[in-house]
Image (cartoon, rainbow, N blue to C red):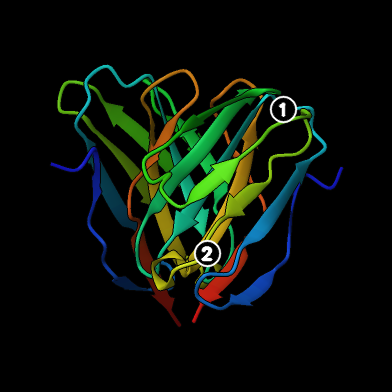
Amino acid sequence: RKEVEQDPGPFNVPEGATVAFNCTYSNSASQSFFWYRQDCRKEPKLLMSVYSSGNEDGRFTAQLNRASQYISLLIRDSKLSDSATYLCVVNYSSYKLIFGSGTRLLVRP
Amino acid sequence: NAGVTQTPKFRILKIGQSMTLQCTQDMNHNYMYWYRQDPGMGLKLIYYSVGAGITDKGEVPNGYNVSRSTTEDFPLRLELAAPSQTSVYFCASSYQGNEQFFGPGTRLTVL
């Protein structure tokens, strides 16, 4: 079983739609969690951290479910500029992150 | 701040050649990392460093070497390049080992 698993997609949604991605992780001792965004042929960039209480940043909401070992990302009112690959990232030690393979999102006009 | 910079941006190598990928960060981060990303795949950790003079292997270290003589620089050395090393290489740094900041990447092709 992969340490971090994501549905590769692509998720093809119209502008204005709400879309959600899930990610599961295998190590219950994981300490912290993140969503990164990666545009085509670019470096990954931090989108948001995921806290136990959940957190929201504008149109983006991240949730953590430790009991079921998954994290989620909800994007409301999708924009064309949201088209990218979203990487689920789990911290397994004090310095090492494990990256999922990513979920690709395509937002169409 | 320039953040994390990498050179070169692109490189084509012949089988058996060697090269060094440069990575520099100006954020005074202790932790630095090298990843490779193959098309359509996730990032795989090659090597990492938790401070100057300290390096350790990641998931896919074979065929690579690193050094960390200063806080700012973390070069990755490829010896005897092979087609399997064709990939995009990302360098990253972090302050306390959590959020990582990435450089723009080096696209390497080995023919």
Q: In the rendered image, which residue does mark 2 sit on?
A: B88
Q: How many marks?
A: 2
Q: Identify the secondary structure beneath mark 2.
A: strand
Q: Nearer the viewer, residue A71 or B81?
A: B81
Amino acid type for the residue under numbered disc 1? His
Q: In the rendered image, which residue does mark 1 sit on?
A: B29
Q: State which chain disc 2 sits on.
A: B
For this view, does B67 lie left or right of residue B97? Answer: right
For this view, does B100 lie left or right of residue A101? Answer: right
The answer to whether one can see residue B41 in this image is: yes
Q: Identify the secondary structure beneath mark 1.
A: loop
Quarter of the image holding residue A96? top left
Q: How crowded is the residue under tag 2: few (<14 C-alpha within 10 Å), some, or many (20+)? A: many
Image quadrant where one finds the C terminus of chain A: bottom left
Amino acid type for the residue under numbered disc 2? Val
Q: Disc 2 or disc 1, which is closer to the eye?
A: 2
The structure residue drawn at horizontal position 38% and vertical position 20%, both measured from the top left corner, is: A53
Q: State which chain disc 1 sits on.
A: B
Label 2 or label 1, whichever comes before in sequence order? 1
Q: How crowded is the residue under tag 1: few (<14 C-alpha within 10 Å), some, or many (20+)? A: some
Question: x and y percent of residue A38 in the render?
Answer: 51, 59
The answer to whether one can see residue A57 in this image is: no
The structure residue drawn at horizontal position 34% and vertical position 33%, both measured from the top left corner, is: A63
Question: x and y percent of residue B18 in the render?
Answer: 61, 63
Q: Nearer the viewer, residue A30 or B47?
A: B47
Question: x and y percent of residue A26 in the render?
Answer: 19, 31
